Amino acid sequence: MRVRNVAPETKSLAAAIALVVGLVVASGGLTAAKSPVLVGPDPAGMDSARAAEPIRAEAVITADDRPDLFAGADRVRTGFGFPAGTKKAGRHVHDGFQNSDYDEVSELGSNGQPLAMTQFDGSGRLLEAVRFDIPTSSAVHVTGDTAAKSAQRGLSSSGLAVTGEARTDFVSSDGGWDVHWDRVADGLAVRGDETRVHVWADGRVQTVATVEHQLAPAPARKLSQPDARTVVTKQMDQWSGTSAVGYSVAAMNLEWVGPNAAFDASKLSAAAAQYRLSWVVNVKPTGPEAEYIQLITLYVDAGDGKIIGGDFVE
């Protein structure tokens, strides 16, 4: 580890950032342990597993149990052109480490090998779909525009709606494309939420994934941008102490964000909360401080003006 000599005028802010780094490392370590797997068809088994959280538990689901689930999986598989198996396997998964539950249906080949898989949340919304076969070599390499249209057709055929213009990123590892639709609610970005489709070089869809968080009601009266800037200024001055550490506000945008424990250790074990409308404020340290951290992002709740989380770039 390289040790730097920290100037006295930077120690207060450097200490605050060191705390942030420590929090992120600590929170990442919470999920490092291996989780036992319990398999059983009875709901009572699932309840006992939840009582012993964190744990991962699975329960078998059949087509007779959930015809709607299997019908939804067929619709997704057909819509995206995924391979069909000779039989299907369903299961409900409770992941105590990620605090999530989902239903999964797999297409299985004659030897039991998985050919494709779909996952849904409790409301039946698609979380992920993937095919497991390997693309054959092809002289055809579709353009980004063609890949976006292929992804859009698959989404429409599967009953999935996306809005706005797609973004396409070329993937050099396989010559394909990642096609993204960022989520927007009430005309504002939902930070991190998106629908992403990977399209092989020949135009076939390989994977589909959606990330969508529940949103809290928007505040009746929104905090103004100047007031949000004042909140951030006070926080930065508090971190700096009497050292008057230099910084500048690089950008301020109103977005839906997820509260986190970036600047509050007491929230490390808190359950995931609804996304809240907030001012996302990027602060750029200047002078010697920039050697230690490039950017600090703070989330200022647009309702009560409290800092509810953020992020940083070293």
Image (tube, rainbow, N blue to C red):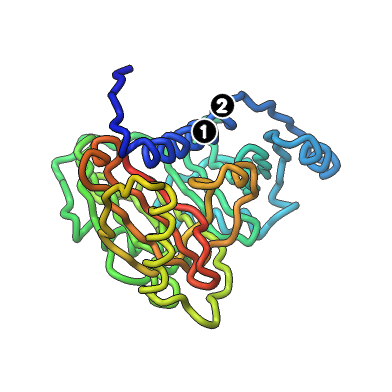
Q: Are marks 1 and 2 in contact (CB under 8 Å)?
A: yes
Q: Residues within 10 Å of mark 1 (few under 14, many from 20)?
A: few
Q: Is residue 170 left or right of residue 80?
A: left
- SS for callout 1: helix
Q: Does 221 sit above or below residue 104?
A: below
Q: Is residue 156 visible?
A: no
Instruction: Name, please, the residue furthest toward the bottom.
Output: 220
Q: Residue at x 23, y 45 (%)?
A: 176
Q: Which dot marks residue 32?
A: 2
In front: label 1 or label 2: 1
Mark 2 Cα within 10 Å, few/some/many (few <14, many 20+)?
few
Q: Quadrant of the N terminus?
A: top left
Residue 204 x, y percent position in the rendering: 30, 49
Seen at 58% across and 69% down, the residue is: 216
Q: Residue furthest top?
A: 1
Q: Is residue 305 left or right of residue 295?
A: right
Query: Residue 121's x, y, as percent?
Result: 60, 54
- Marker disc for residue 92: none
Which of 222/12 is in front? 12
**Which residue is labeled 1 in the image?**
28
255 with respect to 122 (left or right): left
Three-letter code for the amino acid on which mark 2 is drawn? Ala
Q: Is residue 204 visible?
A: yes
**Residue name at image x 42 percent, y 36 percent:** 15
Q: Quadrant of residue 138?
A: top left
Residue 118 on image: x %, y %: 52, 48
How much space separates mark 1 and mark 2, taking CA atoms? 7 Å
